Amino acid sequence: MKKKTYILDTNVLLHNPDALFSFEENNIVIPFAVIEEIDNQKRRQDEVGRNARVVANKLDAMRDLGRLSEGVTVSSGGSIKIELNHQDLVNIPVGWDLQKPDNRILAVAYHLMHECQEPVYLVTKDLSLRVKADVLGIPSQDYYKDKVNYPLLYEGIRTIESTKEQIDQFFKEGRLPLGSAIEGYPHQFFILKGMGNSSQSALGRCVKDAIVPLKNSEVVSFGVRARNKEQKFALEVLLDDEVKVVTLVGCAGTGKTLLALAVGLEKVLEQNKYSRLLVTRPIVPMGHDIGYLPGSKEEKLRPWMQPIFDNLDYLFCNQQDPLNITDHLIERGFLEIEALTYIRGRSIPKQFILCDEAQNLSPHMIKTVITRVGEGSKIVFTGDPEQIDHPYLDSNSNGLSYLAEKLKSEELAGHVVLSKGERSEVAELSAQLL
């Protein structure tokens, strides 16, 4: 197979430092402008800064293999080379401002495309840069290593037409064996629908080698009862302590966060299954940021975490002073609300962990969060891949979609897509029409 040359943009490396080694036996070229941009990001105290430092360390370690300006061979059989800028070369299109890093990256790609014998591709997560590359005739593409096909994302729910005999067997024996005609993933949910004009139907869940009835479909968890079949499925995996990782995907108002909080409080306060409910979410603004906030860490976090407090207020709405109850739970250590920024390096045992708005996390960040889970803990990720505020993530490349697809075959994981809004008629209508 003919080798290819891939030119990596800065955002690819800041998205996933392991992208350096994701192109097998092909040649990797890193423009000098990318090194400068990475150097400008390394002092940031967030995931981007951390990734910039990781990339810098990896490249520094490669210097032992040879001069990076001449190219060094890596274990996959390919090579990595840092290419100097081509601003001193001729035949650059008129109007090309080489003071801009993006244009300097394009200059490298433009000239390598005319100099190299093998195919050359620019790899970037920047849509505008891909458009510019297309105008110049430079082949470009996104970084696909951690992408999934969102329209075909595993839903965790399957409807199958069943005979009267199969449905009767399901109710009589409490199970319907899986076979060549019916296959399922662990904890996948089934809607058994009678054939033809039959009104028979049943809801079941794949456990081991059979579809079994739901155990918790009518359970009231901390005052919350499921309003539709998807919520019944969600409660089923949330209440099952053997399912250690749960992903809930759905648009606004489908009840993802509320169900997870209700079950978390039930498990911590009523059942004493976990020592604490830990709620976290990424700090990603929608629209313009409001800048630095005054006060303690808790006071700074309050605006970012207000959706969580709104749901807690709803769960405690029957109490005289729901705000004081929430503060009381935090003071007693039963409830912790933390920014995702501070979760790195922690080990979290015997806790019910809720990571809300997980669609704003990259696959690498999801891995960082899930590896914090200690013995006896359960973690729930909720979000809507169609409402992403991160500049370099989309419905195909975000960590929530990636995690759901990667764990669908694992016994410890459960996944449900919720489609019916239950917040209000206004919210449901808006979600459908706007």
Image: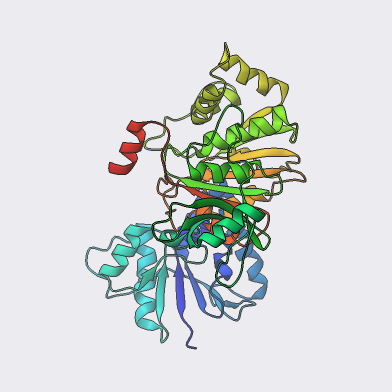
Residue 53: x and y in percent read 60, 54
Residue 430: x and y in percent read 31, 37
Is residue 340 something one can see in this rendering?
yes
- Compared to residue 413, the image places residue 284 above or below, namely above
Please report the residue visible at 31 percent of the width from the left and 37 percent of the height from the top.
429
Q: Is residue 314 left or right of residue 179?
A: left
Across the whole image, how many numbered discs are drawn on residues? 0
Please report the residue visible at 60 percent of the width from the left and 26 percent of the height from the top.
297
Please report the residue visible at 52 percent of the width from the left and 41 percent of the height from the top.
231
Is residue 44 something one can see in this rendering?
no
Residue 143: x and y in percent read 46, 65
**Front-lying residue, 160 or 260:** 160
Q: Is residue 126 left or right of residue 340?
A: left
Q: Is residue 64 left or right of residue 15?
A: right
**Front-lying residue, 365 or 96:** 365
Q: Quadrant of the C terminus?
A: top left
- Compared to residue 45, the image places residue 75 above or below, namely below
**Front-lying residue, 96 or 413:** 413
Which residue is situated farthest in the left direction here?
94
Which residue is situated farthest in the right direction here?
375
